[in-house]
Amino acid sequence: MDAKTDPTDGKRSGGAGDEPMLAGIALPQIAADIWDLKYRLKKPDGTPVDATRAETFARVAHAATGAEAEGDRAAHARAFEDIMADGRFLPAGRILAGAGANRDVTLFNCFVMGTLDDSLTGIFDSVRDSALTMQQGGGIGVDFSPLRPKGAPVASIGADASGPVSFMAVWDAMCRTIMSAGARRGAMMATLRCDHPDIEDFIAAKRTAGAMTNFNLSVLVTDAFMNAVDKDGPWDLVFGGRVWRRVNARDLWRRILRATYDHAEPGVVFIDRINAANNLAYCETISATNPCGEQPLPPFGACLLGSMNLAAFVRDPFTAEARLDTDLLDETVPPAVRLMDNVIDISNYPLEAQHAEAIAKRRIGLGVTGLADALVMCGLRYGSPEAAEVAGNWMKQIQRTAWLASTELAAEKGAFPLFEAEPYAHNAMAQRLGTDVQEAVQANGLRNALLTSIAPTGTISLFAGNVSSGVEPIFAAGYDRKVLQRDGTHRTERVRDFAVELYREVSGDEDGLPDNFVTAQDLSPDDHIAMQAALQPFVDSAISKTINVPEDMSFEDFGDVYLNAWKAGLKGCTTYRPNPVTGSVLSVDAPAASPVPDNGGSHEPMARGATLPGYTYKIRWPESEHAIYITINDTLEGGARRPFEIFINSKAMEHFAWTVALTRMISAVFRRGGDVRFVVEELKAVFDPRGGQWMNGHYVPSLLAAIGNVIEQHMRETGFLEAGEPAGITEAPSGTLCPRCSQPTLMHAEGCHFCTNCDYSRCG
């Protein structure tokens, strides 16, 4: 089928009775659900403004032409609509949801905050800037390396510094508060240099379940450190020109790897390699990335994202003639680059410094999605040498075409203000792309300092029909997803991978899969590294990619993954191994399990004895006139006490309804048995958007958190929790719990977490 004349181009689709299509098959219901939930423009009362998907694309297209000359807008709008309508180009969610909506939101996905000033005023100025940025929907990265280490003297007040990790908790609390006030996402990345004196505290910052839950962590690993690791040499931890301690480099490296092996963080960012390969190395230094890692950015750096959906370019799929339509790819990239360049001019910016930085360099992040689907449709096995070579060639073509399109835009509209011809025309990327690109850069300049970046694209990929996300392998042939209905009920929908659906449509085989079909669970770490390494030479920024490793992989083999990533020339490495803190990935073949572990293999509640021992605790919440009494009764199990039921009482009638509900729900969880420690962390994580209160010299973020503190105190005093033992889950649950709906239905794939029970998603 020739996509240039495909009658099912999607421009008529999206409303009742219409079926948006890709490659000749109707998109699944999940695509409509995602559109309606996340990208469809609605009035404040929920009344739809966009009647169809086509109207959403038209809104975005016409908004993007606001940066064009008035007489050219209609033609450009048609071109923008065309590349979106049949699924070839997918702007990131911020653009789809916000462009043309007349709302005070940013269209940029990600930012890196300004360099931290090592003073209390400077730190909290940055907290404010971070809050304003996340309020408009942007994820952020913060480098905490400029903050003095714990124990360093603060001469102005005659005290010792508390260290960068302590201030990370301030950001974490701020992010949780912003999220509780209605933001859909609150992703943050924290980085710290490998030579900072507090690096060991940073490495261990997320060892406890529930700690720093809004942060992804990455260590900034230098070439000097890797050389010291290779030689098993000493490594100095320095700050302010002073050596604070000397450690063994290999021991520190093993500590990083052990933390990642045990609880999935921190990742590593090869920061010297990033700066050396940066097109803008002559005018900026990078020390942080966005939350998913595909955008290393300078202070106040911002980048918007969009993806070429490679699955939409495959012709004659699952046949001997299967191929990528490279001519159509060349036609699609230039309008995609123009649209994204225009968004720089029409977007809001939370901070003026972000606006100035974006205009000075005009970064964009054009990437790909559907790579694994495109490969399987072309008869290639993801992870094989043949697939890596083909994928690299596809990315090279996108990069070449994007650079050439940017030179043409520069001739028309001017190069980005900080452009310098000499370093650009002779940098390594331009040399890889060929003499014609170098000559065009010298003749016209570049409109955009960096053009390509590969993001996770989790939700966007669902919107496109559940194509494989970013450059990740296919996660699963299919899985069950609960979808919330308007009447509050749920329906369960079987979601199948796009390539699987297309194969069954083409072959008529409802049960079989192509011989070259593989999923993330079938691949070795080396397969993942090979694919990422094949694309990285043709990506200006970086690639968000997760290397899935099996739970039973030995620690020694796990360490080799990071060394191999370093040797392969990657800019960073992120792995995911099921572990006790983050849990294991939800099985895609089995129904969701109970969020509470079994009680001896039974889900029946424990029987209540006639008499139960218990304690009653009295607390006063400053906003309430009356005290609150919390009674916790225990049952005996093997001679030990464990919580069985809770009662919450007060004369304050404004609390009556929710205290009764809370009493029943928590008691029901307790009576199911198993590991109930998560109840404490769930309650303590609740932040009142109006602000918390000081109780007994400690800040408590909400009344529910205060109740959580009482339950934790009781668990410790009765011996259910040992001294120093975390109250959160420390043994792997049957599935990863979603922070929004508390069901064990949180998947980790393509560099992101997403819940199959609700609409929650978050990078990292």
Image: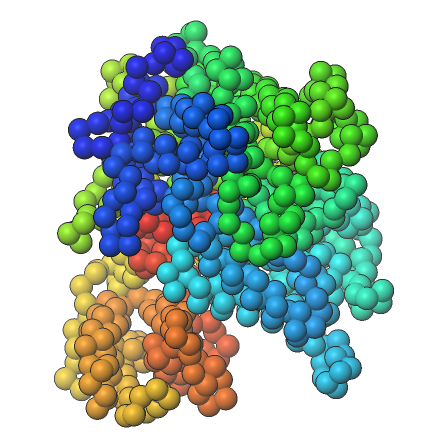
Q: Quadrant of the N terminus?
A: top left
Instruction: From the viewer's side, name the closer residue of 491 and 98.
Output: 98
Q: Is residue 272 left or right of residue 628?
A: right
Residue depicted at x 32% and y 44%? 41
Q: Is residue 493 left or right of residue 711?
A: left
Residue depicted at x 31% and y 77%? 642
Instruction: From the viewer's side, name the closer residue of 427 and 76.
Output: 76
> In the image, residue 233 lies at what x, y percent?
82, 53
Residue depicted at x 75% and y 58%? 195
Residue furthest out toward the top = 321
| 722, above or below 144, in the image | below
Instruction: From the viewer's side, name the closer residue of 375 and 168.
Output: 168
> In the image, residue 277 lies at what x, y percent?
73, 37
> In the image, residue 98 lies at what x, y percent?
41, 45
| Residue 553 visible in the current orientation | no
Instruction: From the viewer's side, name the closer residue of 738 and 85.
Output: 85
> In the image, residue 381 lies at what x, y percent?
48, 22
Residue depicted at x 16% and y 73%? 607
Q: Is residue 655 left or right of residue 401?
A: left
Q: Is residue 719 left or right of residue 67?
A: left
| 741, above or below 310, in the image | below
Report the number of discs. 0
In this figure, which colouring scheme has been used for the structure? rainbow
